[in-house]
Amino acid sequence: MSGVGKGIASSAIGTILKGRGFSVTALKIDPYINVDAGTMNPTEHGEVFVLRDGDETDQDMGNYERFLDMDLTRVNYMTTGRVYQEVIRRERNLEYKGKNVEVVPDIPKEVIRRIHKATELADAEITVVEIGGTIGEYQNVIFVEAARMMKLDNPEDVGFVMVSFLPIPSKVGEMKTKPTQTAARTLSGIGVQADIILARSKFPLDKKRKEKISTFCNIKPDRVISAPDIDSIYDVPINFEKDSLAKILCDVLNVKPKKPKTDLTDWKKFVKKTKNGNKEVNIAVVGKYFDSGDFVLSDVYISVLEALKFSSYKVNAKPKLHYINSKEIEKNPAKVKELKKYDGVLIPGGFGETGIEGKIRAIKFVRENKIPYFGLCYGMQLLVIEFARNVAGIKGAHTMEIKPEAKDLVIDFMPEQKKLMKENKYGGTMRLGSYQCILKKGSIARKAYGKMDIFERHRHRFEVNPEYIARLEESGLVFSGKSPDSRLMEIAELPKSVHPFCLGTQFHPEFQARPLNPHPLFTEFMKAALFRSNTQPSSQRPKK
C-alpha cells in the first residue's frame, strides 16, 4: 500500500548490493497519468524532487540518490503518462511500421525498453526497479505485466521483492498475515511469484509468522525478511543485512557477490552519528504545506528535513525539527515572537499567496533578533522582499507571482517565462536542473563551499529584478552568488558583522545533500544554530 516503505526498501536494497561490490542503479515507476510530478500539488503527492538534468520526479528518486550517493537522470524515472506519450509519438511517426499498436504488449515493451536503457546508460550490473502503487490496482497492471515478460525472457536474471504490511489491530493484539497472503495470491494471479517478501510491521516478525507466510505465500522461510518500524530510515540497510538479504538477492539473481561480506563501514559510521549527537538543536521549519486533513504532512519538505539532519550529525548535534504553519502567523501576528525560542529558522520553497505575509513577518523577526535564518528558493525571494520593505525603504516591494500590479516588483518573471505564461505552458517550463553559480570572495557562501565555482539545482520561474539590485546592495544586502553572466542573483546574504547567519538561495541545495556528503550551506546554517543553542538560556528553549 502507499507509504508502506517501498522507496526506502528499494534504496536500502541498492545500498547493500553496492556494499557487495556491484554497480547499481535504480528506477521509479509511478502509475499516474501525469507526465512528471511537476504539476502536482505537494499535498497530493509529497515533494517534487528535481534531478540534475531538470526532470521533476517523485520524492523516492531523492531517496535513491541519497542512499546510493549518485546522480540519476530522467531515464531513471517513468510514469504511465510518459510511457503512453512515447508510444503514441512513435506510432504517429510510423515507427511501428503500420502495425496495430495495442496496450499489451506494446506498452509493457516500452517499459522494458526504458529499464534496459537506464541500465545501459548507468553501466549497471544490477538495476532496482520500484513499481509504485498497490498490488491489484488497475493503474500499475501494465508495469507488473512488463516485469512478468522480463522474467519470462530471462528467468534467471529477474527477481521479485514484495513489500507487504502486517497489521496488529489494537483490540486484537496479534500480528496478522492474512493481508500479505491475499496480496501474494493477487500478485500470483497477475503471473508474478514473489521471490522475497519484506514484512513491514510495527514489531519484528516472529518464527510463527514467518512460517505462516512461507506456507501460504509459496516462499522459503529465510526469504521472508523482517522489516519492523525503526527510529531512522538509515538503519534499514543494516537491519536487512541481519537477515542476510544481500546474499539472498544474489542467490535469486544467480550472481556471485564480489565481496564475501557486505561492506557498510562508512554507512555504519554515519548511522552511529545519528544516535550520538551531544547537543540538541531546535530548528523551526516555517512552511504552508503541512496540512493533510487532520494530519501533518512533512513529506512535502522531505529533502530539506533530511539535509538538516545530515548537517546536524556532521556538527555532532541532535536535530529537533518543529513544523510552523505560516498561515497561523499570518492570522495571529503575535505568534511570530515564538520563533525566539528556536536556534534556527528555515523557510523552504513553495508557490502561491497563502501564508506569504506570515513568512515575511517571520523573516523580519529573525533578522532583527539575529536568529540564524536559511531561505530556500521562495525563502530567498521573501528575504529580498522583506529587506527591500524594511531596510531599503521600498515599502511596496512585492513579487510578480502574487501582486503583478505592485509598483515595486523586486521579484519578477524571467524574460523567457513571460512568453511561456502567455501561452499557458506550465508543465516542465520552469528554470529546472543544474546551473552554474559564481561565488563572491569573502562571503559566507564562498567560505562554506571552499571554492568559487559551483553547480546547483533549480526549480522556479521568478528572479530578483535587476532594476533593484544596486539599491538593495547599497542598503547592505550582499548577492554572494550570481550566474556566470551576473544577470541572475543566486544567493543573497547579510554580512557576518550584521547577522550570524542570514542567507537565502534561489536554487535548492537540499537536492544535493547526502548522508555521507552533507551540503555545505546546511552545515554552515547548523553551525550557527548550534552556537545559538550553546549560548541561549535553557528557560527560553522549546519545552519537551
Image (spheres, rainbow, N blue to C red):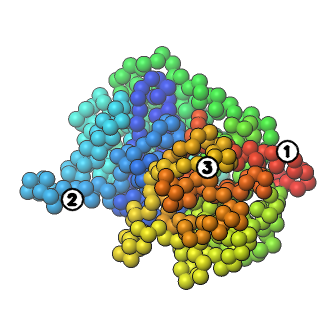
Q: Quick one: SS at disc 2?
A: helix
The residue that label 2 is drawn on is 89
Viewer-closest of 453 and 370: 453
The quarter of the displayed image where residue 193 is located: top left
Of callouts 3 and 2, the N-terminal one: 2
The quarter of the displayed image where residue 346 is located: bottom right
Amino acid marked by disc 3: Lys
Of callouts 2 and 1, the N-terminal one: 2
Horizontally, is 416 left or right of 366 in the view?
left
Q: Nearer the viewer, mark 1 or mark 3?
A: 3
The residue that label 3 is drawn on is 440
Query: Cβ–Cβ below 8 Å for labels 2 and 1?
Result: no
For the point 24% across and 36% down, the residue is: 152
Q: Quick one: SS at disc 1?
A: helix
**Is residue 518 visible in this depiction of the protein?**
no
Relative image position of residue 528 (x, y in whole percent)? 76, 47
Viewer-closest of 71 and 440: 440
Give the Cα distance between marks 2 and 1: 60 Å
**Is residue 66 visible in this depiction of the protein?**
yes
Viewer-closest of 285 and 522: 522
Relative image position of residue 287 (x, y in whole percent)? 64, 63
Give the Cα distance between marks 3 and 2: 46 Å
Residue density around tag 3, few if under 14, some if 14–19, many if 20 or more, within 10 Å: some
Q: Quick one: SS at disc 3?
A: loop
Relative image position of residue 67 (x, y in whole percent)? 52, 38
Residue density around tag 1, few if under 14, some if 14–19, many if 20 or more, within 10 Å: few
Horizontally, is 205 left or right of 119 in the view?
right
The residue that label 1 is drawn on is 534
